[in-house]
Image: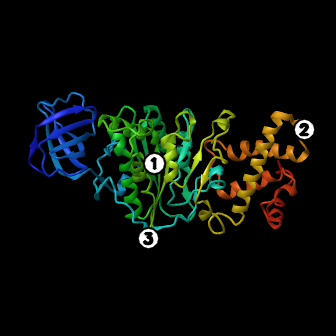
């Protein structure tokens, strides 16, 4: 640490402080700020350097700070997080400090929260199934280890309950070590307590690490919280060999924090006021998911973001879609019908689903059944729209069967309740059971031998 302190503070505006006359300062360098009349220093990091001026982004509020009497010391190192396997079962705040009243963690390593980019040559293709216990995900839009697959939601929709359900139920079939890293970004205090309570009551906390950043916490802390979570995940995955599922909610709040900091820096705004480097910044978060050659562990990422006005063209979901490998979409229409989880299977997409299904991973009939369910549900929805215009009396028997199937598919397959944890085999069997509602001539995506094998096993009492 340098012993030199700088007292030439030219301005303090929002979360930013400008220090003049600096020498040898590096980008992202940690800064210790001592405020007159305070015994505990505040901290920040170097956000920009121009000649002998350094722009410091404060992690805490700048309330009460004045240029006169404030001293800045540049630490000569970047912001690091102490990591240890003992972090499992613990709750931290957005700054990486213990927040559950327990003892401090003795770190095994100290890691730069910015992480290190994974060399594309060192990456392995994700191809192992993760069971979430949610039929609309496991069967229709399969999640695989090492994938980054966001949840697109809207204001007032139950994405928090869906995230908690996935975190409680997620598992890998080979029995490997599995861990959850869960981070909240700018959520309400009630929502943060909901997550903490859900993890504790479900007994999932012992295999989880929680980072809680609420709306009352400093905006700048929100920028570092997802990187704290991912640094922990990288340690557990690539040093301890665990399969780690990272859930980040809500990335829209993170992007709002970036916009606020960008505005304080007086940068030229991009689309809807967001900084022009939003795409690049998001990629530094999303691209930290994956598999690495020679490493047993993996990092799978499910970021959750709310779309303002349910607008998929909003910059946050729009740019996210370019970086990630698909998306789960939470449907307002299904939510109004009382369906939970209200996952829109037609609007959702997992670009890597085919790598996670098949014999030895899920079941041999998975791929064909998924295609048939998609096709039949799409036909049912088309018939539903037609019936609104022409009336159900105009429908033939096949159309009525598809209409009945679409209703049952939403009610019984997509809708399963908040605490029902279905195995993938149970979900697949339910899919075949629903297909018994349709005439055999309509089942064109599955082979006759598959129909004979799986639909004949459904007794007449079980048929819908």
Label 2, label 3: how many angstroms apart (C-alpha)? 59 Å
The percent coordinates of residue 116 (x first, y second) are 34, 60
Q: Are marks 1 and 2 in contact (CB under 8 Å)?
A: no
Q: How many numbered tags mark residues here?
A: 3
165 or 446: nearer the eye? 446
Up the image or down, 13 lies above or below 303; here it is: above
Label 2: how many residues lie within 10 Å, few (<14), some (14-19) or many (20+)?
few
- Depth check, mark 2 against mark 3: the one in front is 2
Give the label on residue 394, or none: 2
Q: Earlier in the sequence, mark 2 or mark 3?
A: 3
Name the side, left or right, on which 245 lies relative to 326.
Answer: left
Up the image or down, 304 lies above or below 144; here it is: above
The percent coordinates of residue 83 (x first, y second) are 32, 55
Label 1, label 2: how many angstroms apart (C-alpha)? 55 Å
Write the residue at 59% across / 58% down: 351
The percent coordinates of residue 62 (x first, y second) are 24, 32
Label 3: how many residues lie within 10 Å, few (<14), some (14-19) or many (20+)?
few
Q: Secondary structure at mark 1?
A: helix
Label 1: how many residues lie within 10 Å, few (<14), some (14-19) or many (20+)?
many
Residue 255 appears anywhere in the view: yes
Q: Earlier in the sequence, mark 3 or mark 1?
A: 1
* Residue labelled with disc 3: 293
Write the residue at 28% across / 35% down: 15
Query: Of all residues shown, which one is farthest toward the top?
Result: 64
* Residue labelled with disc 1: 205
């Amino acid at each position: 640490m340098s012993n030199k302190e700088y007292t030439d503070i030219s301005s303090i505006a929002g979360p930013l402080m400008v220090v003049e006359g600096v020498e040898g300062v590096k980008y992202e360098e940690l800064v210790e700020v001592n405020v007159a009349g305070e015994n505990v220093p505040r901290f920040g990091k170097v956000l920009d350097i121009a000649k002998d001026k350094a722009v410091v982004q404060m992690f805490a509020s700048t309330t009460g700070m004045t240029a006169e009497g404030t001293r800045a010391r540049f630490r000569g190192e970047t912001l690091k997080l102490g990591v240890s396997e003992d972090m499992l079962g613990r709750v931290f705040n957005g700054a990486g400090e213990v927040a559950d009243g327990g003892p401090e963690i003795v770190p095994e390593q100290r890691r730069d929260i910015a992480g290190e980019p994974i060399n594309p040559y060192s990456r392995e293709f994700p191809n192992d199934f993760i069971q979430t216990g949610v039929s609309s995900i496991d069967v229709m839009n399969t999640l695989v280890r090492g994938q980054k697959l966001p949840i697109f939601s809207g204001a007032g929709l139950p994405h928090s309950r869906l995230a908690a359900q996935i975190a409680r139920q997620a598992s890998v079939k080979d029995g490997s070590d599995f861990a959850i890293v869960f981070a909240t970004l700018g959520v309400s205090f009630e929502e943060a307590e909901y997550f903490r309570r859900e993890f504790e009551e479900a007994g999932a906390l012992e295999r989880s690490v929680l980072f809680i950043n609420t709306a009352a916490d400093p905006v700048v802390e929100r920028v570092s919280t997802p990187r704290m979570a991912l640094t922990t995940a990288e340690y557990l995955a690539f040093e301890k060999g665990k399969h780690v599922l990272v859930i980040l909610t809500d990335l829209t709040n993170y992007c709002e924090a970036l916009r606020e900091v960008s505005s304080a820096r007086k940068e030229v705004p991009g689309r809807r006021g967001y900084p022009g480097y939003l795409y690049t910044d998001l990629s530094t978060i999303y691209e930290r998911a994956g598999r690495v050659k020679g490493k047993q562990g993996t990092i799978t990422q499910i970021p959750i973001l709310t779309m303002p006005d349910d607008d998929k063209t909003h910059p946050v979901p729009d740019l996210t879609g370019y970086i990630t490998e698909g998306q789960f979409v939470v449907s307002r229409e299904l939510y109004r019908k009382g369906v939970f989880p209200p996952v829109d299977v037609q609007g959702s997409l997992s670009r890597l689903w085919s790598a996670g299904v098949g014999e030895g991973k899920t079941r041999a009939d998975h791929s064909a059944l998924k295609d048939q369910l998609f096709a039949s549900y799409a036909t049912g929805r088309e018939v539903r729209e037609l019936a609104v215009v022409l009336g159900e009396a105009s429908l033939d028997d096949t159309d009525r069967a598809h209409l009945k199937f679409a209703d049952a598919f939403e009610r019984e397959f997509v809708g399963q309740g908040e605490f029902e944890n279905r195995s993938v085999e149970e979900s697949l069997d339910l899919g075949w059971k629903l297909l018994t509602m349709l005439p055999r001539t309509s089942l064109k995506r599955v082979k006759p031998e598959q129909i004979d094998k799986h639909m004949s096993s459904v007794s007449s009492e079980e048929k819908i």
